[in-house]
Image (cartoon, grey):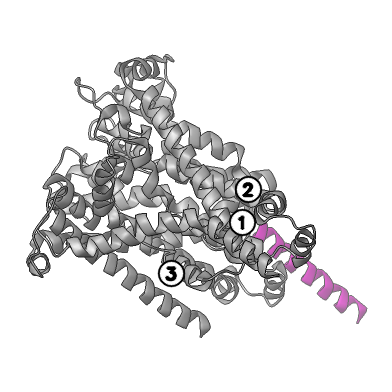
Amino acid sequence: MIKNRTAEVTAALILVAPFVLIYAVLFIYPTIQMVAMSFTNAPLIGEGEWIGLKNYTKMFADRRFQTSVINTFYFVLLTVVPNTLIGLGIAMMVNRLKGWQQSIILALFFLPYILPVSVVFRIWNWMFDMQFGVMQFPIEFLFGQRVPVFRTPALFLPAVAFVTIWWTCGFNILLFLAGLRSISPEMYEAASLDNAGRWKQFTRITWPLIWPVTALVLTIQLILQLKIFDQVYLFVQGGRADPSMVMVQYIYTTAFQKSQGGYGATIAVALFVIIIAMSVLQFTVLRARGEK
Amino acid sequence: MSAVTEDNATAISQRQLRTIKAFDIGGAILAIVTLVSAIIWAFPLYWGVMTTFKPEFQVVEPGFNPWPRTFTLDAYIHILTHTNIGLWYLNSLVTSLAVTVLVVIMGAGAGYAISQLSFPGRKVLWFMILASFMVPIQALIVNHFVLMSQFKLINNWLGVILPQLIVPVVVIVYKQFFDSVPKEFREAAVMDSASEFRMLFKIFLPMNWGVTTALAIITFIGAWNSFLWPFLITTKEEMMNVTVGITQVRDSFGVQYARELAAAVLAGLPVAVVYLIFQRRVTQAIMLSAGIKG
């Protein structure tokens, strides 16, 4: 028996060892390192001196840091709720279809999600092209003139949010579709016997029953969009990055382009704390609402 | 009396008929709206692909030409012969496959141990994995870079691979699935004094083959599509992944949309093909990674 027990423990340790090693070296160690580095004036590569809280006082007074935080939350605002609602709407439309029709329509909505960000960037950069882009037809129709969307500071983040919703909505659609399928059709049959209209069926049956999925989608989206970098970086290439700077981009600019590793780490700590705080907060709020 | 009931009956059935008709019209309108929205939604993909088949002078013609007047593969030929796309493809393929294999193996091993075996530190480990479910890897880019430079892994495949290996979700999914394997299987195998490794590879993994396929596919797609980290860790053009390469290297002759889009189509093609072949598995994997056991 004792021999068996030792064998079991040995086997277990061998099985978890690779994961634990990777986890320790590439997650826990860099996290500690990040905090330590934020108290120094280290360049990206090389040693620095301990400067206490100087980076933090600098950060709170840093206009560009404030802009990056505001822009990040602005982007979250522009994407999270619209993306969730559009996802639910499309899922409800797709859910009405059956068989191969449903598969084809779903694939059309879902395909963008599977593509790399660079491909999405290339497509929409072409779509919005000032001279030849097809999006300029509706833009000209609506505003009376062509608009260089990604070179207009006020339009930049909304346009990137628009592209992001197009790109990632497929994920939400899938989750909502699974949720909708698990609502039993009998509930709708009973409701239609009571002469409940579409809207009533939606508010009384669909919305409350789909709420756990909605909460899940909102949570995933929120965390995801706080970490926004790729699209913003790609679309701003060649233009002025400052007005639309987001947090990860500011980390990149500070640490990699200016080689201020210590200060970059400080901003990274801020992002880390914001993301963890938001996830804890949202988890609590959503759970409270779900239980009520 | 009987005439009244009959009237009533026909009245009701007519009303029912009318609601059924109204319902069908509403349903038909919704179906058409759905179809039109789906076509509009997918239009940018169509438009992007079509543009690659046009000669560059037709791309910049005014007006809306949904179909190329002359088909040409010039843009693709140019990309294949004038850029390092072959190398970028190789880099993407090697790093994505390595990430996939390592993530799945480590995830299965750790998931099996946590699910089936008792060992010191098991609870702590499980708690840490759950707590790091939504960890912001993006916040660690600075220190990942510092670490990789200490390991001398900048512009190196291993440098691209390593930080992408932290995927606690895979462990969580495997643990959940191994938990639901009936106890009898393990007891029978213990009687036969099969080793734990045999049990994992001969019983538990084959029983959950579908999960492994799903996780492998989604990990591969994720690794192929990843941008930020491969972008940071590769500074030499010939070490870039295809997703990074196509955005970093520009023609010196200004914007050439057909070529840029041809490069994009080539970069996206593998994942699009994987998705179209394994649609169901991809769907399942997305549910799994979102925490919905499908």
| Dot label at residue A102 | 2
Magenta segment main secondary structure: helix
Q: Nearer the viewer, residue A193 or B205?
A: B205
Mark 3, residue position: B131
Q: Quadrant of residue A183?
A: bottom right
Quarter-wise, where is residue A72 in the image? bottom left
The answer to whether any part of residue B229 appears in the image is: yes
Residue contact at pointers 1 and 2, CB within 8 angstroms: yes
What is the residue that sits farthest to the bottom in this orientation? A292
| Residues marked 1 and 3, same chain | no
Badges 3 and 2, same chain: no
User: Is residue A180 in sight in this rendering?
Assistant: no
- For label 2, count other residues whose C-alpha is less than 10 Å away and answer few (under 14), some (14-19) or many (20+): some
- Compute the Cα span from label 1 to label 2: 7 Å
Q: Which residues are magenta?
A: B1-26
Q: Which quadrant of the figure contains the C terminus of chain B?
A: bottom right
Q: Residue at x 15, y 53 (%)?
A: A261
Q: Amino acid at mark 1?
A: Asn
Viewer-proximal residue among A26 and B243: A26
